Amino acid sequence: MDIFDIIGPIMIGPSSSHTAGAVRIGKVCRKILGEKPVRAEIAMAGSFARTYKGHGTDKAIIAGILGMGPGDERVRRSLEIAADEGLDYAFTEVRLPRAHPNTAVIHLVDGHGAECTVQGASVGGGNILITKLNQIDTDFSGRHDTLIIPHKDVPGTIAAVTALVADSHKNIGNFRLSRPTRGYQAVMTIEIDGTMEPDLVSKLKQLPNVINVVYLPAN
Amino acid sequence: MLDYHAIADVVREAEARGTTISRVALADQAEALAVPEEAILEEMRGRLEVMRAAAHEGMRADLRSTSGLTGGNAHKMRSYAESGNAIAGKLFALASAKAMAIAEYNAAMGKIVAAPTAGSCGVLPAAILAMMEERGVAEEDAAMGLITAGTLGMVIAQEASISGAEGGCQAECGSAAAMAAGALVEMAGGSPSMVADACAIAIKNMLGLVCDPVAGLVEVPCVKRNAGAVACAVNAADMALAGVKSVIPVDEVVAAMREVGESIPKTLRETAQGGLAATPTGQAIAQRLFDKS
């Protein structure tokens, strides 16, 4: 904890959990999609579902999907901006009894038909946890530079990835492997201390059995 | 480096060096974040500017929140403060007006600085901005005041809570009042131990305050509680500056705040199920807002 955790963040109100955190969940989803989305389906659970209109949680999530941060003045006009930018969106409510009360599931589609689904929770003070990515369990905060690497579940793949990270003199702060079924697709989530060089991503992408590398800068 | 687990540690450090709490914390945070002190001060001045703009925007007579529940009261309060008739005097009334302005602007999706939270974002800036306007406190000293406040807040966050869902409103507006009281004392030239006393007195006077927002929104009673909390802060600072000491040492007060927070029933911790949220009017408002949606 540092002093800016207490005197901060700078954010659009009214709620650090229901507004600022919601922007950040939307932004992570947009970063994972990589391209400009044309369609967004957002399912809100728990307290998000109950109070989202009063807290502007809908505007916050759309703002994040449009690439805005929690302190961006355009957050409150995000629904109009979405219309201008050709983003079609729909909100629904969903029951997720085992999820955190402030949870949203965001499904994005880009102009080429590529899609991604992110489940995230706003856990207080503007902090978030991404708990699912394309139906696979995960667990990262977005506060650190993060690499998300879907790969084939083949021996040596993790060692090859972490060796490249080590070669770039970066320390791994957190590592998680999600593997629904042995031998099929698995996902590594790697949080890095400090900032990553862009060429590491292209090197990682060239590794055998690595399907994709998504790089999320800290936000 | 400081670990911010006890306010007494920071007070002792400041007294040993013959300086202020903010100077000690500024040096420590510069080291911890690996940046020059000036970079931290520059960032604090930037946050002060966001606070000032929010207080200004929030004073509009026609301001309304997204739900329509709040807005416009800060405008009334400022006119009253400027009339010269305020029972408690101008600074006090102006601080209340500013606290409401920032809280109302927050509810209207305005840009604010969480200090320590969005729900309590009006308290600390109101105290600091009122001192700048009415007592001529310089921007540099106001930025240092934010550092004093942040120092107290770090200890409260680690040893008690700054989340209404965890510790009730005492954790949000109570913490903000304690932080503001300490900043006021330092800006007024009080000693580090006076800062600690003001912090302790403010927490004691907010102890047990529940979080019971109508319809679960950061509006009723949050806007007025921001004004109430800055009043508590000004009063606690004046007591400490008068030489009044807290019988219970500040770190024991913070520990009590944690214990009290844990004993507050869940219905009174930001769930909108008890207190004002559960009144007939509170429920009718919730019904109306959710039906509309």
Image: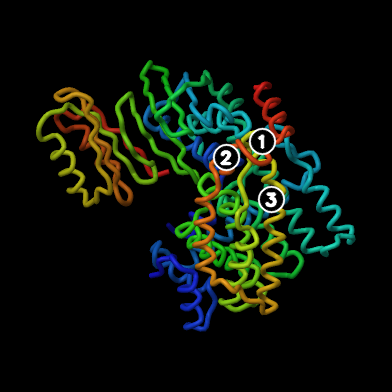
Whether residue A155 sits left or right of residue B86 in the image: it is left
Q: Which residue is mark 3?
A: B225
Cα distance in 3D space between marks 2 and 1 = 9 Å
Looking at the image, which residue is at 61% across and 58% down?
Answer: B207
For the residues bearing labels 2 and 1, Cβ distance under 8 angstroms: yes
Q: Secondary structure at mark 1?
A: helix
**Could you tell me which chain the residue with mark 2 belongs to?**
B
Q: Residue at x 9, y 32 (%)?
A: A155
The N terminus of chain B - image quarter: bottom left
Identity, as a three-letter code, of the amino acid under mark 1: Ala
Q: Residue, x 52% and y 61% (percent of image)?
A: B256
Please identify, in this view, whether the residue under mark 2 or under mark 3 is nearer the observer.
2
Identify the residue under disc 1: B278
Q: Secondary structure at mark 3?
A: helix
Label 2 belongs to which residue?
B267
Sequence-wise first label, 2 or 3: 3
Name the amino acid, label 3.
Arg
User: Label 1 crowding class (10 Å Cα cut-off): few <14, some 14-19, many 20+?
Assistant: some
